[in-house]
Amino acid sequence: MKLPRDLSGSELAKKLSIFGTRFTRQAGSHLRLTTMDRGEHHVTILRRRRMRLWRT
């Protein structure tokens, strides 16, 4: 799967909502998303204009 390189944090949050995550809260420039799939899980993403995603 090819990783998108030019996504903003808001766009990423919208795309993750397809998989069942929902916006929980915002603290400054960070968004917290929560999913209840197989237990409660949280993801924190930086809300900025463009994100840099590195390969691991």
Image: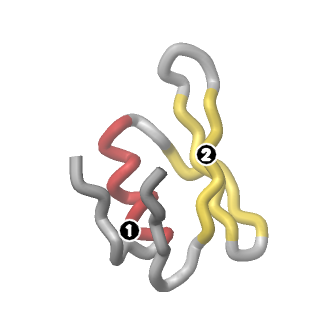
**Of residues 13 and 51, the one drawn nearer to the viewer in this rendering:** 51
**Of residues 46 and 33, the one drawn nearer to the viewer in this rendering:** 46
Q: Position of residue 5 (x, y in %)?
A: 34, 71
Q: Is residue 50 left or right of residue 30?
A: left
Amino acid type, mark 1: Glu
Amino acid type, mark 2: Val
Q: Is residue 56 left or right of residue 25?
A: left
Q: Is residue 5 above or below residue 24?
A: below
Judging by the rendered image, the residue that carries numbered circle 2 is 43
For marks 2 and 1 on the same chain, the one whose residue lies earlier in the sequence:
1
For the residues labelled 2 and 1, say whether their Cβ atoms are less than 8 Å apart.
Answer: no
**Of residues 35 and 3, the one drawn nearer to the viewer in this rendering:** 3
Q: Which mark is residue 39?
A: none
Q: Which mark is residue 11?
A: 1
Q: Residues within 10 Å of mark 2 (few under 14, many from 20)?
A: some
Q: Position of residue 1 (x, y in %)?
A: 22, 46
